[in-house]
Each structure stands twice: as structure tokens, then as C-alpha cells.
Amino acid sequence: MSTADTDSKESSDQREYSTTDIHKILRASVELALTSAEYRHSQLSTLHTNIITYADKKLAQLRPAHYKSIITCTLVQNTGAGFHIANAMHWDNQHDSLTTYKHETDGLIAVVSAYMVRSQ
């Protein structure tokens, strides 16, 4: 099962990119990297690298030249315990955005976020 959050409102007349496209990239980065629904601690480093590398490569193709992107990836074992992530930012709501994709299986929770920030 997967869920999606696009934390900023799409403003097509202001933004030069689509948060829907960013969400698709984040989803693909997780789904391509996860070959199993099981949590394997020994594979976390490789999973992180594969997810971040794929997302970064694809966002570079989408990202306008005057934007910077920041990608985060959190992988945890799904034990049923509480799991919370919080973000705070001060930015230009007309141009900047945060897009998050969450993928959850019986064994693993993956949360990948992409910040797109206009750099003038």
C-alpha cells in the first residue's frame, strides 16, 4: 500500500514544474529500489543510495535551471510502533514546494521527500 502527500498547493501560473511529476519520480525511485517487502538492515545503505540517486537524476531533468532540489529518504522497519516525521520551512509559497511519497509494506516504511527551492 502506498500513500501520497503533496504538501504545497499547485499553482500552475507561478511554478515552472509540476509537483505531480515530482511525486511520480519519488514513487518510481522507491518502487524500483525495493525488490522485497521485507526489512533487511544489511541492505539499507544500498536502498538509500539507489532511491536518492534515481530521484536526483530524474529531478535534474525536470528542475528549471534556477531551482535547487533537496531529497530526503527515511527507511524504517515496520513494527507497528509510532513513526513521525516533521518539517518546517520558511520560503516563497508561489515558487517553492515540498512533495512527499510514502510507501508502506508489512516489513518496511519508506518516506521520500523532494524540496524544490527557487534560487533566484
Image (cartoon, helix red, strand yellow):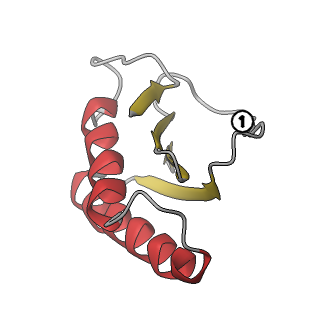
**Does residue 65 appear anywhere in the picture?**
no
Q: Nearer the viewer, residue 49 or 35?
A: 35
* Quarter of the figure with residue 32: bottom left
In the displayed structure, 92 sits above or below 51; it is: above
Position of 48 compared to 12: left or right?
right
Position of 6 compared to 62: left or right?
right
Rendered residue at 26%/41% (across/down):
24
SS for dot 1: loop
- Where does label 1 land, which residue? 89
In the displayed structure, 18 sits above or below 106; it is: above
Rendered residue at 29%/68% (across/down):
57
**Crowdedness near tag 1: few (<14), some (14–19) or many (≥20) residues, C-alpha within 10 Å:** few
Rendered residue at 47%/56% (across/down):
68
Question: Mark 1 is on which residue type?
Answer: Met
The N terminus sits in image quarter = top left
Q: Residue 12: image x %, image y %?
A: 28, 19
**Does residue 31 appear anywhere in the picture?**
yes
Q: Residue 115: image x %, image y %?
A: 52, 45
Q: Nearer the viewer, residue 86 or 78?
A: 78
